[in-house]
Image: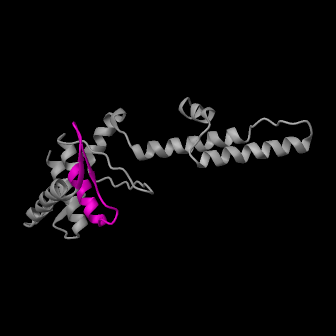
Amino acid sequence: MASTVINTLVQIDHLKGSRSITRFSSNEKYRIDNNYEDLLEILHKTLNKLTSKTAKDTKETYINYYLIRNVRNDEIDYYNILLGFLEAYNLVSFELFGGNSPSISLRINAISQMERYVKNPIKYDNKILTDQYFTYLRAIEMYKYLFSLPEVGDSENEKIYNYTKEFWKIVEEYFFGNIPSKVEHAVYNR
C-alpha cells in the first residue's frame, strides 16, 4: 500500500519537476520534503476536475469521460496518475482510448500494477494494441486475397484485364469499408 502512494507521489513530483521526493536507489529508501501535501492536493484537484468539469456520459455501470484533444499533456498525465492510483486500490477500472491517431506511451513507475499483470496476464487488456494487431492481420490477409485472385479469361490479355479490373474493384470497396468476408474470416480464425 505504501509503495502505491510513494509511486504516485513520485510520478506527480516528476511531472511538476519539483524534486520534493528523492529516491535512494541503493536500498529503496526515499526522502520526502515537507511540501508532499502539495502533491496530494494535485491529486485532489485532478479528481474534482475530472468529476465536475469534464464532459461525461453516465451509463448504468460505468462513466465515460471525454477529454478534448487540446487539453495539455501534463493534465492528461495527472488524470492517468489519479486513475492508476484509484485502480491500484480497486476503486475504479479504467481504459484510455486514443483519438484519430492512437498511440501508446509506456512508463513503468507503478510497479505494483505491473506486478499484478505479470502475476495474472490474462487480466491485462489493451484495446489500442488489440485493434492495431487486427488491423495488421487484416492487411496481411487482404494482400493474400488480392494477390491470389483467380485469372479468368481465354487469352493472356483477357486474364490480365479481368484480374486488374477485379483487383481495383476490391481495393476500392476496401477503402469504402467493405472488406471481403473471406478476409474477415481469415483474420478472426487465425
Confirm whether the magenta stretch covers residue 62.
yes
**Image check: 147 left or right of 177?**
right
The location of residue 128, given as percent across then percent down, is: 42, 47
Quadrant of the rendered image containing residue 137: top right
Q: Magenta includes 37?
A: no
Residue bounds of the magenta highlight: 55-83
Percent from the top left, x then y, of residue 153?
Answer: 87, 36
As drawn, is 121 to the left or to the right of 141? left
Q: Quadrant of the C terminus?
A: top right
The answer to whether one can see residue 76 in this image is yes
Q: Residue furthest top?
A: 189
Which is nearer the eye, 38 or 44? 44
Residue 182 located left or right of residue 120: right
Display colour scheme: one colour
- Residue at coordinates 37% horizontally, 54% vertically from top-left? 106
Name the one closer to the observer, 160 or 2: 160
User: Where 190 sits versus 160, above or below?
Assistant: above
Residue at x 15%, y 67% (from the top left corner)? 20
Which image quadrant: the N terminus? top left
Q: Position of residue 21 (x, y in %)?
A: 17, 63
Q: Quadrant of residue 136?
A: top right
Q: Is residue 28 visible?
A: no
Q: Residue at x 12, y 57 (%)?
A: 44
Location of residue 187 in the rendering, given as x and y in whole percent from the top left corner: 56, 35
